[in-house]
Image (spheres, coloured by chain):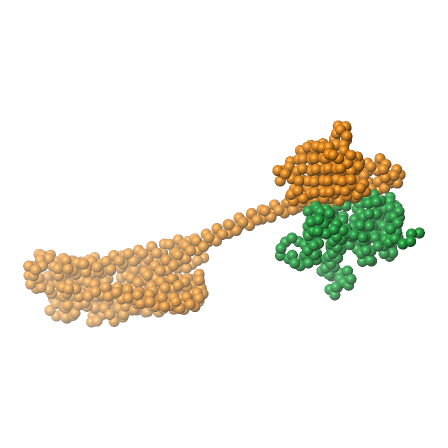
Chain colours: A orange, B green
Amino acid sequence: MNTTPASGAVSGAKLGLVSRWVLILGIIAAITAATYWLHDRLPEGDIAGARMLAVASEGPPPDFTEARRVRLPHDWHDDIPNDVDYVWYSVEFLHDPAADPYPALFVSSLGMNARVYLNGKLLTQDGRMSEPVTRNWFKPLWHTLPESGLRSGANELQILVRGVPPVGGFLGRVYVGRENVLRPYYEGRYFLKVTYMHLLAGMSFLLAIPTLVIWSVRRHDTVYLWHALASVFSGMYTLAISLRDVTVPAVWWNWFGVNSIGWVVIASSFLILRFLGLRHPRRERAMLVAGIGGAVVLAAVAAVSPPWFYLLGPRLWDGLVLSLALYPAWIFLRHRFELPNTATFWLMVTGQSLIAVGFHDLLMVNRLIGPYDGYFVLYAGILPQLAFAAILVTRFLQSIIEAETLNRELQQRVEQKSSELESAYRDRGELEQARVLAEERSRLLMDMHDGVGGRLVSALARAEHREGAAGPTVASLREALADLRLIIYSLEPSADDLRSALALLRDRLNPACEDAGLTMEWRLTGLPDDCRLGPRNTLYVLRCVQEAVTNVLKHAQATRLDIAATCVDGEIRLGIEDNGCGMPESALETGRGLANLRKRAKALGGVVEWLSLQPGTAMHLRFRWAK
Amino acid sequence: MPAVKPVTYTVGIVEDDADTRGRLAKTVQADASLRLVGQAGTCVQGRELLRKIPQVLLVDLGLPDGDGTELIREAAAAGCAHIMVITVFGDEQHVVQAIEAGATGYLLKDASPRETVRAIHDLVEGGAPISPGVARHLLARLAPARPPQPVVETSLLTERELEILRLVAKGLAYAEIGALVAVSVNTVAFHVKQIYRKLAVHSRGEAVFEAMGRGLIPHGGPTGG
């Protein structure tokens, strides 16, 4: 996560946030206004006043002559004792069958259930009026008035409202008018208070699924778990408010509701802490203890004394929850610049809308405004959850993509490294082989120096001493020594190309030729630099040249020797030409040296030829060479 | 008695094989321009011989009581101007070893008397022989072909010396090289000798450096060298 954006980016983000805040605030205001408009006085049929009578139990419509007059909508909180279960309302309206034969009744909001009589006859009742009372909190009531029950002129509607002491009860606005005019208002309100509530609950539960799935594969990343929990509790709270038929007594359902909202706040606090990577063990423990302990204490109170529960629960507990809700907001505001800009923006916007509706609900709970529109927090509560879900899922997906990219890069790097390693290993193997060969060669050479070579030279010296420089033993020993040298040259690592090997030989042959008054001219520049034949073939070539030069020295009485090497079309051509006395024809058949030369040329896969020059002889050696 | 006394060079021989030594001694003694000042069969005797500071020292590497390269080093330090290693094959390994120690030439053990005398004269009066292998070795040691540090490394050798080394390494003869770079054969040989001397100094420098690294010589630095 990007934790330290540049300050420029921050101030830019601030400006952007301000302008977008204004936009979002406008949207919230519009939604709020729309809700009020739905509830505001409709173009017709509004019954502004009623007569009201609190009663201890349900029964037929009472006599309203002694009843107080009140304005509608009417909240019990204003002028009815806390322990009252039922309140009767009587509203009157005029009916003109000619203008509107089938008028309809529309009550904008109920607190919490109602039974309606038309002119003393039961018209409608939605669910149960006694414990467990059907929970029609904030929901609208709709009924068409039957022609049979209507009187021309003055008519009376008697409405029995069932409240929940000591929370109280209320009756929203009452309209009797044309069905086609009122119906859309009823349906709009029904959607907002019933259908949409169920949608919200469903959405909350659905939002928990992706983060729960992510958490199941990333147990250590508890931010996902807390998001899922916050969503689930939020869904539960929505159900607590909006579910119509419950089988448990109102006090226990209320217990369920207050605990749900408490845990929404606790889970949200954990969510924002984990999201920011923060840990405050003591505060966290305190929150968990308060959440669990509060649930237990409230349950005990609810079991012993429901009135005390209502006093503690909705009042004290809700206050506690509300102040606790400031904690995640505070944490978020303190660390907002550590978050990525988009995350900050959406959380701010959604959080702010939550604050706005929370303010409305606070006013309503404290009866500073009427209770008829119900809690707004549910509508806005889904927004931070949505934002969080989007942020978390995006973050998760991004981390997957990042991991995949990294993985791919890693794989590439591993492949590259392993191929490098392979080639390095191969190179090392080759080097190692070359080193072993060089060492072996070095050892052989040392042995030859101290052993065979030294003895040969020593024997040569003795033989020379005994029989003179031209003796047959001397000649044999010289030949043996010369061939041994050739073998060594052919193995010289730095003379692995033909030109270098020939150059070595040239240096060796020089003294003998000079002694014999023979001038050698070597032209090796026609050979490529990389003309490598391998030790075996190099030795064959060296032997050929040495043999040829020796022959010239022995027999040709030449003063000049031209040795030239070229490479043409993959064929190496060696020419050795002297200006001596020439070679007798017979030598071609019988000469041992020439037979040797032929044999070596054949071993090279080439041919050797002799040409008579005027004067002298030319020897040409040709063989194929492929790089 | 000739009217003008010819220039003579004092020669010392260190060779463990008696027959070879005898043969070499005979060759040297037979030449009027060379004067044999001593013969040795071992390192110990060789050191004795060095006291006479022969101008030319012929040394075999494989001595019964030690390494000939040590003796070469001592001879160079003692002031022997020309040191030739006596080698059976004239192979790269031997020659390079000797050159690094301070030799500037080499002599084949079975060289004829004429060859021997000529080789000694060539070395004293002119230059030094070199083979392509040795040239390559020198190039690798003194002028690594890698571009990053050519200035420092090649500064040891002059451009001309490098050029000659490269041509030798390619297998060209002194005559061919002389024709290519427009100098005489003798000049090419002279350059090669210079290169040998530089290599010997360079090798000694390396040895000193290594010795300092190992704490054998105090860091004040060696004197002479």
The residue most toward the front is: A614
- The residue lying toward the viewer, choosing from A546 and B210, is A546
Q: Residue at x 63, y 45 (%)?
A: A429
- The residue lying toward the viewer, choosing from A241 and B210, is B210
Q: Residue at x 71, y 49 (%)?
A: B179
Q: Residue at x 45, y 57 (%)?
A: A220
The quarter of the picture where the N terminus of chain A appears is bottom left
- The residue lying toward the viewer, choosing from A545 and A316, is A545
Q: Position of residue A461 (x, y in %)?
A: 85, 41
The quarter of the picture where the C terminus of chain A appears is top right
Question: In this rendering, does residue B144 appear at all?
Answer: yes
Count every numbered label the image shows and give the total: 0
Left of A252 or right of it: where is B81? right
Q: Quadrant of residue A557?
A: top right
Instruction: In the rendered view, tell whether residue A277 sits above or below residue B30.
Output: below
Q: Residue at x 8, y 56 (%)?
A: A148
Q: Position of residue A90 (x, y in %)?
A: 13, 65
- The residue lying toward the viewer, choosing from A497 and A113, is A497
Q: Position of residue B189 (x, y in %)?
A: 75, 51
Question: In this rendering, does residue B65 appear at all?
Answer: no
Q: Quadrant of residue A535?
A: top right
Instruction: In the rendered view, tell whether residue A437 sits above or below residue A6.
Output: above
Q: Position of residue A362 (x, y in %)?
A: 29, 69
